[in-house]
Amino acid sequence: MILMKRPIFVLLTLLLFSIACVGISTPATQTVAAIPTGTNDNPLVYGNITLKGDPEFITQTRAALALLEEKDPEAFTKIQTYVGIIEQGQHSGMWAWEIPPRYEVGNATAFYSVTWYASTIAHDATHSELYTRYQNEHPGRACPSRGVQRRGDRALL
Ligand SMILES: [Zn+2]
């Protein structure tokens, strides 16, 4: 357990250093924060994503995210950028217009298999990405993907 103390010490050093730097340097441009990974002490958080559901659902969701993190870093980065909450629910669907965007997942999707579940997370993160892009390009207008999301799945799949 001595090994565990070293990263904490490094983290504290970095934290103190960054506190000391506040006020000295202000970044000129907004920098994209590094995507945090699943190496987190809190099981209900995976990187930027909050997980909501029963313990089995949380375990399954973490397995799916870990699979994506390991096998498809590009998809994982997209998910971490465009999905804020993954929540167990009655049905599966991406609530892209919520803040933060929420992926609601039914048990049929989550527990079919870890691989299948992971692919649906990546798929629905794309809905959120497209929605966000549309909002950025057409501020104040309703996104057409909200109505035709399911039809659009043919193009995404
Ligand atoms: Zn879809």
Image: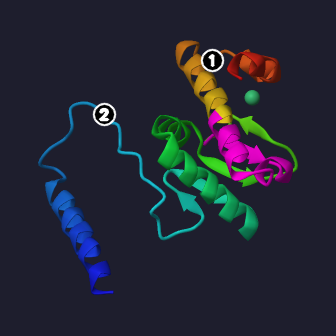
Question: Dot 2 corresponds to which residue?
Answer: 30
Q: What element carries label 2?
A: loop
Direction from residue 35 to residue 19 in the image, left or right: left
**Mark 1: is the Cβ under 8 angstroms from ligand 1?**
no
Asked whether mark 2 lies closer than 8 Å to ligand 1, one says no
Mark 1 highlights which residue? 140
Span shown in magenta: 100-122
Q: Nearer the viewer, residue 85 or 153?
A: 153
Is 136 situated above or below 29? above
Numbered circles on residues, count: 2
The image quadrant where one finds the N terminus is: bottom left
In the image, residue 151 above or below residue 109: above
Rendered image quadrant of residue 111: bottom right
Q: Residue drawn at (35%, 37%), measured in percent from left and top?
A: 32
Answer with left or right where residue 18 lies relative to residue 112. left
Q: Kindly tell me whether residue 146 is visible in this rendering.
A: yes
Residue 96 seen: no
Q: How crowded is mark 2: few (under 14 residues within 10 Å), some or many (20 or more)?
A: few
Mark 1 vs mark 2: which is more N-terminal? 2
Q: Residue at point 72% right, 37% down?
A: 95
Amino acid at dot 2: Gln
Q: Nearer the viewer, residue 24 or 6?
A: 6
Label 1: few (<14), some or many (≥20) within 10 Å?
few
Determine the residue located farthest toward the left in the rendered image. 24
Q: Is mark 1 on a helix, strand or loop?
A: loop
**Side of 88 where 46 appears, left or right:** left
Q: Residue at x 58, y 12 (%)?
A: 138
Q: Quadrant of ligand 1?
A: top right
Q: Where is residue 112? Give x, y as percent.
A: 80, 50
